[in-house]
Structures are given as C-alpha cells and as structure tokens.
Image: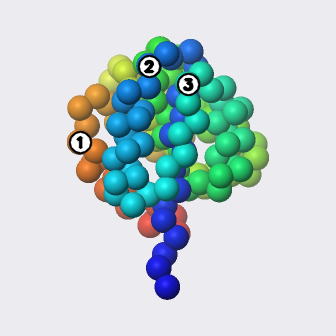
Amino acid sequence: MSERPIRVLVAKPGLDGHDRGAKVIAQALRDAGMEVIYTGLRQTPEQIVEAALQEDVQVIGLSILSGAHLHLFPAVVEGLRARGADDILVLGGGIIPDEDIPELKKAGIAEIFGPGTPTREIVSFIREEVAKRS
C-alpha cells in the first residue's frame, strides 16, 4: 500500500496580478508526485486558510510580488493557529527583501524561497519537513 501523496496549497495572497512563478512551482511539485491545489490570484488570508482546511493540505506555499508579505504571510499563520491547524507547513516565495526574512520566520513561515531557487530544493525541503511532522 503506497503512502498518501503530500498535499500542497499554492496561493497568491493580496493584490498581485502575476502568477507565472506560482504556476511554475505548482507544476514542479506535481512533477515530483505531490498533489497541488492552486487557489488563483487575489486571495485573502482567510480564503487561503479556509481552502487549506477544506483540502486537508500539509503545506501552504504563498507567493507574493506586491510587497505586502509582512502583513499577509503572518495573517495566514495566525488564521491557521486560530483554527487549530498550526501543524500545516507554511512557505513563502516571490520578491521578498532579505532583511524581511527573519521577521517572517519569527512569524511562523518555515522558509522563504526567492526567485531562481531550484525547484528541486523546494521539493526536498517540503519532503524533509513533512516527514519530520508525520
């Protein structure tokens, strides 16, 4: 009997109008055997949390270009905690200044992957972290 595939929700919080990077990541995760749900553009933190719970995901990947990461990413983590789902791994990516990464990690974002990160690194990180939590 095979193990259940890792389920990942890929989401674009805020007002970003571009999702090419999120779609590339979603496809790379699918190619790696993960089940991926992509919520589309302009999602609120509340919508992302609700979708993650409905889809029973183990991982949320947030992608942002707008500069609102310090507000939106922690709001997703807070929403998960409020719903008793703080076991879901939350990752971030997009255009995020290096100086903001420590604050995001302090807020509960497990890792930030910037532009140019090899997709195999993201896949490996997810597999390792999900295995630790199983």
Where, by quadrant of the figure, is residue 50 drawn?
A: top right
Badge 1 element: loop
State the CA–CA distance, disc 3 to disc 2: 8 Å
Residue drawn at point x = 66 percent, y = 26 percent: 44
Q: Which mark is residue 41?
A: 3
Question: Of callouts 1 and 2, which one flags the residue occurring earlier in the amino acid sequence?
Answer: 2
**Would residue 33 be seen by someone viewing this image from the given angle?**
yes
State the CA–CA distance, disc 1 to disc 3: 23 Å
Question: Of callouts 1 and 3, which one flags the residue occurring earlier in the amino acid sequence?
Answer: 3
Q: Which mark is residue 36?
A: none
| Residue at far right of view | 83
Residue drawn at point x = 23 percent, y = 32 percent: 116
Q: Which mark is residue 18?
A: 2
Looking at the rendered structure, the kind of residue marked 3 is: Leu
Image coordinates of residue 3 in percent, x first then y, are 49, 75
Q: Which mark is residue 118?
A: 1
Badge 3 element: loop
User: In the figure, 45 relative to 82: above or below?
Assistant: above
Looking at the rendered structure, the kind of residue marked 1 is: Pro
Image coordinates of residue 83 in percent, x first then y, are 76, 46
Question: Of callouts 3 and 2, which one flags the residue occurring earlier in the amino acid sequence?
Answer: 2
Which one is in front, 125 or 101? 125
State the CA–CA distance, disc 1 to disc 2: 20 Å
Which one is in front, 45 or 71? 45
The reply to whether discs 1 and 3 touch (Cβ–Cβ < 8 Å) is: no
**Would residue 89 be seen by someone viewing this image from the given angle?**
no
Query: Residue 55 vs residue 121: left or right?
Result: right
Category of crowding for the residue at label 3, using alpha-carbon neighbours closer than 10 angstroms: few (below 14), some (14–19), many (at least 20): some
Looking at the rendered structure, the kind of residue marked 2 is: His
User: In the figure, 121 relative to 71: above or below?
Assistant: below
Badge 2 element: loop
Where, by quadrant of the figure, is residue 87 drawn?
A: bottom right
